[in-house]
């Protein structure tokens, strides 16, 4: 690496998981969450959702700073007292807004939520989860006004917001962070998979495999990630000769999705490849195509835009794109804590580059 001149600006620093763990432990000590001694390593690893290696690095740093001390095989003793006793105003509240319960969430999203709740609770926050389908309608203003007036919180994590909801949140300048993609032109901090890159790669891959009639299967709605998916696939195919792209938008029910598939299968120039959003719908598409006598990948190819453990059980094994749930969870926890403590998030809009997981379906 070349040496930077003295006048060069300071390089940006990346927050590490060790740094975040140090902050969590320090806050817990300051707030009196632990008295006298820290719990054992196993308990701390479980409550903070970190590895023992990460925890030990954080504990070593705290010991060097004089927060804790240890002799021999004794428990780590807290040497810095908690902060001065002040009139309690209650814990900071982190609100999580979603349209559906955890039972219906894909496993990677449920993992992120479980990690978020564990780490924030360990740091002294109170996490409140609100399932509010009315806030996710095509005209959500009235429901959103009522909901946020009745449920104050220090910061909000909002899951899978569509464009009308995003506009309302941006206009009100609420301290919120999106788990999902912010739509073009809407300035909300967010974190998501880079679906534009994933679908751009998928388009090029399918072209190289000889496919010229491609279908993109998306749920109806105005989600930022779905907008980026369509744009990425279109960008990949735009200058390639002879390509036909169809976008199949379904209402998320099996009956409607299968009806759309039947229409294109029976029509002229049926697609030879399907790029499908949402793992549950990938399974529907694969099973219905095989029900109609289509062999995968001999007759048609199927690619999943998203990753999910259920796709490990498909035969043939479906090709897909995915990011590590642990990476996603750590970045979201850091962003929410920044938002709660400073009123803003330095994360901005971050898109995590997914890995292509090759299967047998293309």
Image (tube, rainbow, N blue to C red):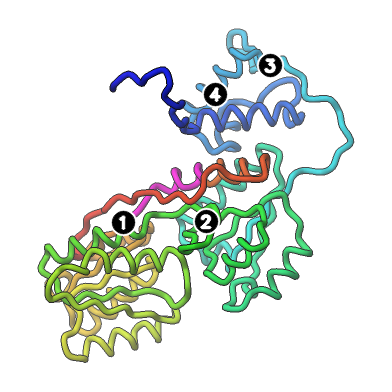
Q: Quadrant of residue 95?
A: bottom right
- Which numbered disc, 3 or 2, marks the residue closer to the eye? 2
Q: Is residue 326 magenta?
A: yes
Q: Give the range drawn in magenta.
A: 322-331
In the rendering, which numbered label is found on residue 179? 2
228 displayed left or right of 52:
left
Q: How crowded is mark 1: few (under 14 residues within 10 Å), some or many (20 or more)?
A: many
Q: Which residue lies furthest to the top in this view?
A: 71
Q: Mark 3 points at which residue?
A: 77
Q: Mark 1 points at which residue?
A: 197
Residue positioned 38% across, 64% down in the render: 228
Q: In which quarter of the image is residue 359?
A: bottom left
Q: Name the residue under label 4.
A: 58
User: Disc 4 on helix, strand or loop?
Assistant: helix
Position of residue 239 relative to residue 75, above or below, is below
> Could you tell me how far apart the alpha carbons at marks 1 and 2 are, in whole angstroms?
18 Å
- What's the magenta bit mostly, secondary-structure-wise? helix
Residue positioned 58% across, 36% down in the render: 48
User: Disc 2 on helix, strand or loop?
Assistant: strand
> Could you tell me how far apart the alpha carbons at marks 4 and 3 are, in whole angstroms?
15 Å
Q: Residues within 10 Å of mark 2 (few under 14, many from 20)?
A: many
């Amino acid at each position: 690496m070349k040496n930077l001149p003295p006048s060069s600006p300071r390089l940006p620093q990346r927050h590490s998981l060790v740094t975040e763990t140090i902050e969590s432990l320090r806050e817990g000590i300051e707030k009196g969450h632990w008295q006298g001694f820290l719990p054992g390593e196993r308990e701390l690893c479980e409550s903070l959702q970190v590895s023992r290696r990460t925890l030990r690095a954080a504990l070593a740093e705290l010991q060097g700073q004089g927060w804790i001390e240890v002799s021999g095989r004794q428990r780590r003793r807290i040497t810095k007292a908690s902060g001065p006793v002040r009139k309690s105003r209650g814990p900071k509240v982190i609100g999580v807004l979603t349209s559906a319960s955890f039972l219906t969430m894909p496993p990677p999203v449920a993992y992120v939520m479980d990690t978020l709740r564990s780490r924030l609770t360990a740091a002294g926050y109170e996490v409140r989860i609100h399932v509010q389908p009315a806030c996710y309608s095509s005209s959500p203003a009235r429901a959103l006004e009522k909901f946020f007036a009745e449920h104050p919180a220090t910061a909000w994590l909002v899951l899978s917001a569509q464009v009308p909801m995003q506009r309302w949140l941006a206009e009100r300048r609420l301290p919120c962070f999106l788990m999902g993609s912010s739509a073009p032109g809407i300035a909300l901090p967010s974190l998501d998979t880079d679906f534009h890159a994933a679908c751009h790669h998928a388009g090029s891959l399918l072209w190289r495999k000889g496919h010229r009639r491609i279908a993109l299967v998306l749920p109806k709605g105005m989600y930022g990630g779905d907008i980026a998916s369509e744009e990425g696939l279109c960008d990949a195919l735009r200058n390639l000769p002879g390509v036909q792209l169809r976008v199949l938008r379904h209402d998320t029910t099996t009956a409607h999705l299968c009806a759309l598939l039947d229409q294109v299968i029976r029509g002229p120039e049926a697609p030879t490849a399907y790029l499908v959003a949402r793992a549950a719908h990938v399974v529907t598409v694969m099973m219905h195509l095989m029900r109609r006598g289509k062999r995968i990948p001999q007759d048609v190819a199927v690619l999943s835009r998203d990753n999910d453990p259920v796709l490990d059980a498909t035969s043939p094994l479906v090709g897909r794109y995915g990011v590590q749930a642990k990476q996603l969870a750590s970045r979201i926890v850091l962003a929410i804590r920044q938002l709660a403590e400073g009123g803003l998030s330095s994360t901005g809009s971050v898109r995590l580059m997914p890995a292509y997981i090759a299967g047998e379906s293309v």
